[in-house]
Amino acid sequence: MTPDLLTAAGGAVTAVLTAWNAKQGKKLRELEGKTAQLETWRTVAIGYIGTLLFLLAERGIQPPQPPKELGLTLTVNQPKEE
């Protein structure tokens, strides 16, 4: 193989890898954006669900047990009798 042929082949491989890397970088940035959006949505939803559970319990309504994945627990403090 001649040096010119090796240089051309190396340049072609470099161009292909650069294009592939750019495409993967774009996909990664899109996924990071979606992940951040979902994390924000989850945080807001957990707060909202927690408020609803509190309001139900405060009014004497037995709320349903939330999914374990949310990390919410139902504890109702009964007024202490003196």
Image (spheres, rainbow, N blue to C red):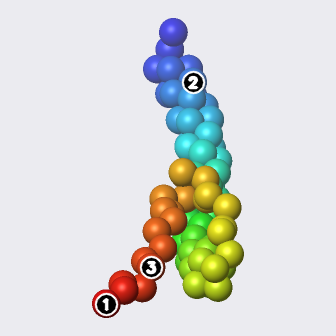
- Which amino acid type corresponds to the residue marked 1 in the rendered image? Glu
Up the image or down, 7 lies above or below 81; here it is above
Residue 62 placement (x, y as % from top left): 65, 69
Which numbered marker is on residue 78?
3
Which numbered marker is on residue 9?
2
Up the image or down, 70 lies above or below 45; here it is above
Could you tell me if the residues under marks 1 and 2 are in contact, i.e. CB atoms within 8 Å?
no
Furthest toward the left, the residue is 82
Point out the image quarter for the C terminus. Answer: bottom left
Rounded to the nearest angstrom, the CA distance separating label 2 from label 3 is: 77 Å
Q: Residue at x 43, y 77 (%)?
A: 77
- Which amino acid type corresponds to the residue marked 3 in the rendered image? Gln
Please tell me how many numbered marks the rendered image carries: 3
Residue under numbered circle 1: 82
Rounded to the nearest angstrom, the CA distance separating label 1 from label 2 is: 88 Å
Rounded to the nearest angstrom, the CA distance separating label 1 from label 3 is: 12 Å
Q: Quadrant of residue 44?
A: bottom right
How busy is the neighbourhood of tag 2: few (under 14 within 10 Å), some, or many (20 plus)?
A: few
- Which amino acid type corresponds to the residue marked 2 in the rendered image? Ala
